[in-house]
Image (spheres, rainbow, N blue to C red):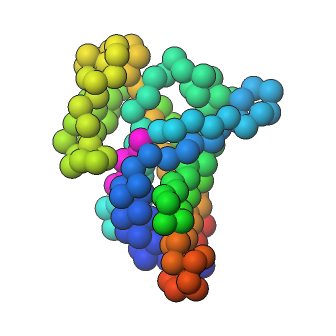
Amino acid sequence: MTDLTAIAPAFIEMAHRIVWATVATVDSTGQPRTRILHPIWEWDGSELVGWVATSPNSPKAADLAGNPRVSVTYWDPQQDTCTADCTTSWLTEPDDRTAAWNRFLRAPEPVGYDPRIIPGWHSPEAPEFGALRLVPDRLRVFPGTLLLRGEGDLLTWRR
């Protein structure tokens, strides 16, 4: 088992390079549901937190109301994969929503973007704009070189 201080930077490097993640929830009938999302991750040296800009009126939001857990997986053609199993929470306070909006607006590409490109998201106060916080309970970083050539290290961490 890897220490969080060793795995968090490796996870962020891979996730931010790949950018788009498959995120799984469980719906009200117990069925798994996946979608592609664009999280941003922050590491302050002791805590790793992810952020997703998404609609609080989406099917995903209904899934999270029943079960706030998600699994976030990144993959690229070189077979690099990383996964974060997380507990989610919605940011509902105006200051928190603005801070989340600004994270995406100010982050460097390719993870940063102007949220106004999404229809209905004219500002952080827009009813269709939501900010979802991800707190990992488990991380896994699996470099494709380990699978293809036996080179590199599999990193895992659990809270």
Total marks shown come to 0
Q: Is residue 94 left or right of residue 133?
A: left
Magenta span: predominant SS is strand
Residue located at (41% from left, 16% from top): 128
* Residue 13, quarter of picture: bottom left
The N terminus sits in image quarter: bottom right
Q: Is residue 52 left or right of residue 150?
A: left
The C terminus sits in image quarter: bottom right
Residue 116 covered by magenta stretch? no
Q: Nearer the viewer, residue 108 or 146?
A: 146
* Image x and y of residue 149, in percent: 56, 83
Residue range highlighted in magenta: 38-42
* Residue 123, quarter of picture: top left
Residue located at (57% from left, 36% from top): 35
Whether residue 159 is visible to the viewer of this picture, yes or no, is: no
* Image x and y of residue 69, in percent: 63, 43
Residue located at (58% from left, 28% from top): 60
- Residue 135 higher or lower than 53, as above or below: below
- Residue 111 higher or lower than 46, as above or below: above
* Image x and y of residue 62, in percent: 62, 23
Residue located at (24% from left, 47% from top): 109
